[in-house]
Image (cartoon, rainbow, N blue to C red):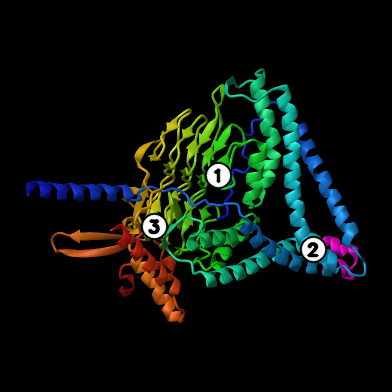
Amino acid sequence: MNEKIEDEQKDIEKEEEDDNEFVIDFTTSSAIHRVSLKFLIVYIPIFWFSGLAVATFWYGYTISPVPWIIKLLFLPLILLGFSFLFIFSCFFFSKLLLIFINLIHEPKEGIFRTDKGDTDFEFWKIRTEIKKITLWLIRNWPLPWIDVIAFRWFSIKMDFTSHLNDAWCDAEFISFGKHVTIGQGAVVMSSMVVGNYLIIKKIRFDDYALIGGQSTIAPGTHIGEDTVIGAVSTTTLNQDLEEGWIYSGIPARKLKPNKYAEMRRDIIHKVDVDEEEKIETEHEVNIDDDKKHLIKRKRGGDNK
Amino acid sequence: MSVPNSMRVGPFCASVLAKKKYMILYVFLIWVTFLPAILEIWWYWQMLWHEDRPLHFYVFLPLFLLVIYVSIVFLAIIFTKILLVIISVFHKPREGVFLRDTSDKDYRYWSLRNTLKKWPTWLAHKFPFPFLDNVCFRILGTKTKFSNSLFEGWVDTEFMEFGKNVVVGQGAIVQSSVIIGNFLIIRKTIIEENVRIGAHVIIMPGTHIGKNCILNTWSSTMVGQELEEGWIYNGGPAKKFKKNRFFEDIPIEKLSKSIGDIDGLLKKYDEQREARGTTKKRLLHRKDKEEHTTEEKE
C-alpha cells in the first residue's frame, strides 16, 4: 500500500513539474514575416488601385487650363495632398481586403499551432501583412498624430489623447483607454510565437496608463488605471497590473504606489483628525479655484 | 506592425567611416543605380505615352513605379556585389581582433565594406517587402533561408549563418562585429534552426545558438558564448532558464493554464456567431478532432 501511495505522489510531483515546464513565464516575439507569393498578391492590388486614384487627379492637374506659374506655385501643396490621397486610398483598399478575409475566417484569441496547415496561423499572417503596409505608410509620413486614425480604422478602440507613435504595436486585439502614453521603442504584442505555438490574447490599457521606453508588453496583459511601467521592463503572459502602482523590472514587479497620479489630477485629499472632538475634516489642496470645474472628481467629490 | 523610428535601425551595417574618401564610392554607387532606372522610365514613356489617349500610360503607371522600385533595389545589390568582389581581391575579409586605427588594413576594409553595403540595405529595408530584405541578405553574404524573418531586427550582413525558421524579434540586434575601446572584434555568429529570439535581445559576435532555443526579451549574450540546444535563456549574460519543451506536441489544456480560460473564449466566439446567425461547422469539427486525439492518447 505504501509503495502505491508513494508512486501516486511521485506521479503528482511529476505532473506538477510538467506543468511548471509548460508555464509561459517569459516573453519572445511575434515578428514572423515569411516570404511567400501571397504577400505580393496582396500588395499589388492595394498599390495599383490607390496609385490609380492619384494618377487620375494628376492627369486633371496637368491638363487644367490654369497658367503654368500658378500651377508651379501650388505644386508642393498638391503633392502633399496626393500623398495623403494615396495613403488613405491604401487604407480603403486594405480595409476592403481585410473585411473579405475576416468573412472567410474570423480572427480570434487562443493558442494555435504554427504549422502550414493551421488556418488560424495562416490568416493571422495575412492580416498582419495587410495591416503592416498601411501602418508603415502612415507612420513614415511627417504627421505622427494621424496614425491614431489608422488604428481606429482597423477597429481598435483608441482616442486622440493616447499616443503610441514611436512604439511597435500590433493592430488587433488591443483596447486603449484615454490618455495612454507608450514610450519610444516599446513593443506592444497581442500575439506571440512560443516554440511551435502562436498565442493571441487581448491587451487592455486603462485610462492614464504610461509605458516607459523600450519596454515589452506581452499578450493578455491588463494594465490598470494610473499604472506606470518603467523603462526597460517586460510583462509576462496574462499579467494583471494593479491600478495606481509603479512597476518595473523583468518581469515587471511592484516598485511603489503611484503618487504622481494624484498630483497630475491637481488634487490631493488631505485628512485631518481632531483628537479631542473626534472629527475628520477633508481638504482639497493644490488647486486653483478657477480650475475646479475642470476636474473629474473621483471619490464622492460631487456631493460637496 | 510598422517599425517606429526609434527602432528602425535600417541599414544592417555599422556606420564607422574610417576614411572620408569612401564617401566617393558611396555616392558613385547611388549615381550608377539610378542610371538604368531612368532608362526604364524613358522606355515606358516611349512605349505608352500618347497625347490623344493618355489612359494606357496612367493606368499602368502605379504598377510600373512598383517595378522600378524593385529593379532599383536589385541593381543596387548587384553593383554593390561587384564592388565587394573587386575589394575582396585586394583584401579578403577575415575574423579576428583588430586595432581600431586607420593604419590597420582589416579595420579599413571592414569600414569600406560596410559603407558600400549601406545603400542597398537601406533601400531594401525602406519599404516593407520582406523578400527584398532577404534577397539583399543572401546576395551580400549572410547565409540565410527564406523561411527566416529578420525584418524587424538589426542583423549584420557578413560572417552570419542562419538555419531554418529563425525569428528575430522586434528591435533585436544580431551582430558579428563590435567595437570595444581600441579594438574591433569580428567573429562568426551562428544561429541554428528554430531559434526564437525575443524582442530587444542583443547578440554579440561569436555567439553560437543551438537548435530550438528561445531567448527571453532583453537578454543578451557575451562574445563567443555558446548556447546549448533546446533551452530557454534569460538575462544578460544569458543563462539557462528552463528546458524548452514548446517544440513538442503538448496537449493544449496544459498550455491553456498559463493563457487563461480558453474554453470560455471559444464559447464567446460561438455565441457571437450564433447571434449573427451563421453556422460554426468548422469549430465543432475542430473540437471533435481534439477529443478524438485526446482519447487516442489515453
At label 1, counting other C-alpha atoms closer than 10 Å, the crowd grade (few under 14, some 14-19, many 20 or more) is many
Using the image, name the chain to which the residue with label 2 belongs.
Answer: B
Relative horizontal placement of residue B283, taking residue B143 as reference (left or right):
left
Question: Camera-side residue: B147 or A108?
Answer: B147
Residue A272 location, x and y as percent? 23, 59
Amino acid type, mark 2: Phe
Residue B185 position by quadrant:
top right
Give the foreground label among 2 and 3.
2
Relative horizontal placement of residue B270, taking residue B81 as reference (left or right):
left
Location of mark 2 (residue): B60
Residue B103 position by quadrant:
top right
Using the image, name the chain to which the residue with label 3 belongs.
Answer: A
State if disc 3 and disc 1 touch (CB < 8 Å): no
Q: Is the magenta region chiefly helix, strand or loop?
A: helix
Q: Secondary structure at mark 1?
A: loop
At label 2, counting other C-alpha atoms closer than 10 Å, the crowd grade (few under 14, some 14-19, many 20 or more) is some
- Assign the N terminus of chain B to one quadrant of the image: bottom right
- Assign the C terminus of chain B to one quadrant of the image: bottom left
Amino acid type, mark 1: Gly
Magenta-tinted stretch: A61-73
The residue depicted at 61 percent of the width and 71 percent of the height is A96
The residue depicted at 87 percent of the width and 67 percent of the height is B54
Asked if residue A125 is positioned above or below residue B221 in the image, the reply reads below
Q: Disc 1 to disc 3, how far (Cα)?
A: 23 Å
Location of mark 1 (residue): B153
Q: Do dots 2 and 3 share one subunit?
A: no
Q: Is residue A145 visible?
A: no
Q: Please give the label number shown on residue A39.
A: none
Going from N to C along the chain, the mark reached first, 2 or 1, is 2
The residue depicted at 79 percent of the width and 36 percent of the height is B28
